[in-house]
Image (tube, rainbow, N blue to C red):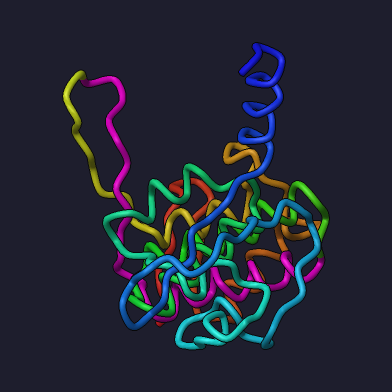
Amino acid sequence: MSIKSIAVLSSVIILIVLLSACDRKNGTIVDIIELPTDYELTLYGADEGIYPNTDILKDPNNPYADANVYMENVWDLNDECPSAKSKFYLWATILAKSPTGEYQYYTAQSLHELYTVGGSENAREQAKKAYRATLDHFFDSVTWWQAWWINDETYYAVLLRNLVGESMYDPSELNLLPLYNDPAQALADLSEWGYYYNTDLGTVSKIN
């Protein structure tokens, strides 16, 4: 094979990100599916990606519906996602299969990212719902961040509820666009849902 042919082939491999879908009964590969890279989000159901809804597993646009997505490989699959839209389908799929606060939060974050990069209003409103579901159903859940300044692999817990507060009130440090025209609107929504975000401490608590 010529050097030119190899270069062309490499370009194709880099540009087209594919997923091997597996039969749910025996796990054998049944198809190769191209992951979406566009910015439009058409929802199969009004609460798709919001626990306890599982419409994501029926969504014909979901490339992960028949794939083996599980705790041990979800982060590798996330790193291979070519777009925020692909990340939404990935995290919403594992959320439907194995509900945890982490999966709900990262579903919300992927929707927030999709709104940021493409301006999808569907993604914007769904992100708000997903953030609320993180608070309503997984209030005490955490995610794990790596202490990158330490040589060995050391991780520490971060409360998801505080990340939700930051994401809704001022997500600029997360490189995400605001979901609200005014941050006071985010505080109002949180209050209506039964939560208080301390903007000085960056913490979320329940309103008694």
Q: Residue at x 54, y 68 (%)?
A: 131
Q: Is residue 207 visible?
A: no
Asked if residue 69 is among those painted magenta in the image, a careful observer would answer no
Q: Considering only vertical position in the picture, is 130 above or below 71? A: below
Looking at the rendered structure, the number of numbered marks drawn on it comes to 0
Q: Quadrant of residue 137?
A: bottom left
Residue at the outermost top position: 3
Q: Is residue 70 visible?
A: yes
Quadrant of the image for the N terminus? Answer: top right
Q: Quadrant of residue 126?
A: bottom right
Of residues 39 and 28, the one drawn nearer to the viewer in this rendering: 28
Q: Residue at x 73, y 65 (%)?
A: 124
Would residue 60 appear left or right of 181 to someone viewing this image?
left
Q: Residue at x 76, y 60 (%)?
A: 180
**Picture coordinates of residue 106 (x, y %)?**
48, 59
Asked if residue 126 is among those painted magenta in the image, a careful observer would answer yes
**Picture coordinates of residue 207 (x, y %)?**
44, 78
Q: Quadrant of residue 95?
A: bottom left
Would residue 136 appear left or right of 130 to someone viewing this image?
left
Of residues 16 and 29, the one drawn nearer to the viewer in this rendering: 29
Q: Residue at x 51, y 75 (%)?
A: 65
**Picture coordinates of residue 68 (x, y %)?**
38, 67
**Picture coordinates of residue 144 (x, y %)?**
29, 48
Quadrant of the image for the C terminus? Answer: bottom left
Q: Considering only vertical position in the picture, is 184 above or below 14? A: below
Give the residues drawn in magenta, as a range.
121-150
Of residues 170 and 57, the one drawn nearer to the viewer in this rendering: 57
